[in-house]
Amino acid sequence: MPNTNSAGLAPDAPFAQRLAYYRERTGRSRAVLGGLVGRSAEWVKGLETGRLGLPRLPMLIRLADVLGLDDLADLVGDQRLSRAAYTKHAHESLDVIRNSLAAYPVTAGDDPMPADVLTGRVEQAWRLWHTKKHERGAVAGRLPGLIADARASARALDGAERRQASRQLAQVYHLAQLYTTFQPAPELVYLTSDRAMHAAADADDPAAIAGAAWYLNHVWRDAGEAADARVELARDVADMLRPGKSAEQLALFSLMHLAIALSHAKVGREGDAWRHHDEAERAARGLPAGYAHPWLMIGRGMVEHYAVTMHLDLQKPGLALRAADRIDPAAIPSRTRQSRYLVEVARAHHREGDDVAAVHLMRKAEGISADTFAFSLFARSMVAELLVSPPATVADEVRDLARSLRLIV
């Protein structure tokens, strides 16, 4: 670890000066530091010159880690870390969903919902999530009732019906996790992912456990935590599956290898990452033409989409763009997935310095799913950078995107 003695800094030195000091102490250029945290050299320059404000807490932690700082105070000094520095705007129904998740009913009720009826309601909620432009708003009114009813059914029913209800309860928690993600409620994201895994285990169903493992992997990967544990979990679940049994089992087998690939890419293990991505692709190619899992959406298109993310995590935006040239964004029948993918391609263009293309793709992503775009951390970061000095040809579009992301009040 580099020497982090800050004797060369005044006690009241601002964040901008501290960042430049520690970057130079480690011998890194702005381009190298930016690449290590998934940002551009211009972004680092903006921080060091004070043109950009204090990043959110997760990015501050990443910067401190790359610079070898054990104490975040070395990086921020006396500057106050306000909630605005690291939280995102909240959906209007967040408190209602929070209260539903925080409720702990001690009785199951006298008339639990039949498992088949519950299954139909959950399937309808997934269709809304994947097909609506404002998916959070579409499911928010249904989630409190689904949470209560699925809990009650999973407790009160017996035998096969109870296991079916537990499978649906796990999916309800998945929906709640997706709803709360990228909002100022990280505790709810952890809570729902953990509860979903317990519900899937109660169902004693490898397919349900695979879905829970996928979403748990997302939580820990986004937090930069538990790399080996999340790989081990996905590998263990893959071993539980029987890819020759059905299209669903084959799709989930592909999904588990995709989870492993993404985890390896996130920590820079390039060879392992692409080896497991190849395994995911081989399995996906064995699926029926046009197949996509009804709520996880895993299919050949999704595996291809995530290749772009992996190239970006491996700091190779040029290769990400080459991969994107071969991918049809509409290959996955889900607005949320398509919008997320377009933001990833925009991120690659931004990293390569083509901000006009990045803005065009972000506009397209917003048009497909306004909610997915509005809660995208990468979109917020890119637009915040572009606001400082937007390309003249798309300056109005940048400001429109900033308003959509609530970066301009």
Image (tube, grey):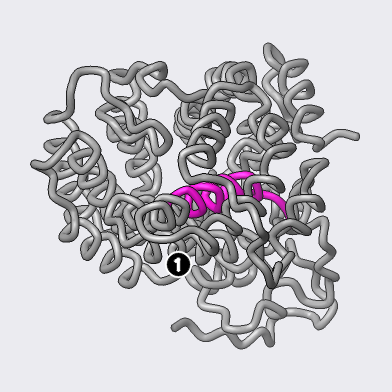
Work out whether residue 370 or residue 297 is closer to the camera in this orientation and state it: 297
Q: Of all residues shown, which one is farthest toward the left? A: 244
Residue 380 placement, left or right of 210 = right
- Relative to residue 295, is residue 16 depicted above or below? below
Q: Is residue 41 magenta?
A: no
The image position of residue 334, as x and y in percent, is 47, 25
Q: Of all residues shown, which one is farthest toward the top? A: 393
- Relative to residue 384, is residue 355 depicted above or below? above
User: Callout 1, which amino acid?
Assistant: His
Residue at the (61%, 49%) spot, across then down: 176
Work out whether residue 50 or residue 136 is closer to the camera in this orientation and state it: 136
Q: Of all residues shown, which one is farthest toward the front? A: 110
Number of labels in the image equals 1
Q: Is residue 180 magenta?
A: yes
Q: Which residue is mark 1?
A: 198
10 Å crowding of disc 1: few (<14), some (14-19), many (20+): some
Magenta region: which residues?
Answer: 167-184
Quadrant where the image shows the C terminus:
top right
Residue at the (38%, 47%) spot, across then down: 315
The image position of residue 406, as x and y in percent, is 81, 36
The answer to whether residue 395 shows anywhere in this view is: yes
